[in-house]
């Protein structure tokens, strides 16, 4: 796999099985030792596929996939905010890569595509919530997100602290070449 062989394209219904796998694998990889093992083990590709199929069919929700050849290796989804306490009208719901594809610029390209989509909106503001223990928080800071408070979330019956990243007045992505 080379960076040049990765393309970013709109997701398709048939991508949802791969997206379910990516979510389960990514959580189990990223949060190993940070979240309870029983919770991580309960995350199945099938349940995640079903969840994303429902989200994918909602009005105003957008999915983009990162594809290497015919293999979906990552995705980002966004749409109308779900939490009215945030002023930003749009929420980045998810941005995930298969373990092993991190730190290759693919996540940046997915986020650039979302930013390009949102930049033409009025106002062009976007937010994302993540667990406070997320070891990838610096990724969002490097890409211009401003850290703000966010409400806690219940996972596996346990409350977990979150933070949010806000992108205000988004400029269009620098380049969509190769996207």
Image (spheres, rainbow, N blue to C red):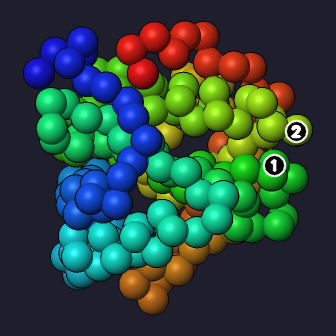
User: Which circle, 2 or 1, is nearer the viewer?
Assistant: 2
How far, Cα to Cα, is label 2 from label 1?
Answer: 8 Å
Closer to the camera in the image, 108 or 49: 49
Closer to the camera in the image, 32 or 118: 118
Residue 67, position as x, y percentages in the image: 25, 35
SS for dot 2? loop
Residue 31 visible in image = no
Closer to the camera in the image, 22 or 38: 22
Residue 63, position as x, y percentages in the image: 47, 49
Question: For mark 1, what is the residue?
Answer: 88
**164 to 154, vertically: above or below:** above
Q: Tell whether 170 sits left or right of 111.
A: right
Picture residue at 51% right of the left edge, 16% below the top: 176
Tell me the number on the disc at residue 123: 2
Picture residue at 88% right of the left edge, 38% below the top: 122
Q: How crowded is mark 1: few (under 14 residues within 10 Å), some or many (20 or more)?
A: many
User: Is the residue under label 1 in contact with that under label 2 (CB below 8 Å)?
Assistant: yes
- Dividing the picture into quadrants, the one containing residue 98 is top left
- Dividing the picture into quadrants, the one containing residue 1 is top left
Of all residues, the one furthest to the bottom in this rendering is 157
């Amino acid at each position: 796999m080379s960076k040049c062989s990765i393309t970013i394209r709109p997701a398709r219904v048939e991508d949802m099985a791969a997206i379910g796998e990516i979510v389960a694998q990514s959580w189990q990889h990223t949060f190993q030792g940070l979240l309870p093992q029983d919770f991580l083990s309960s995350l199945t590709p099938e349940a995640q596929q079903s969840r994303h199929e429902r989200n994918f069919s909602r009005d105003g929700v957008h999915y983009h996939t990162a594809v290497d050849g015919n293999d979906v290796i990552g995705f980002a989804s966004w749409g109308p905010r779900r939490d009215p306490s945030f002023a930003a009208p749009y929420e980045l719901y998810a941005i995930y890569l298969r373990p092993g594809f991190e730190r290759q610029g693919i996540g940046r390209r997915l986020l650039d595509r979302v930013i390009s989509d949102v930049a033409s909106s009025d106002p062009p503001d976007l937010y994302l919530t993540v667990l406070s223990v997320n070891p990838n928080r610096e990724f969002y800071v490097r890409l211009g997100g401003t850290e703000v408070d966010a409400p806690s979330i219940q996972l596996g019956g346990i409350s977990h602290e979150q933070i949010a990243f806000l992108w205000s007045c988004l400029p269009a992505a620098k380049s969509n070449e190769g996207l």
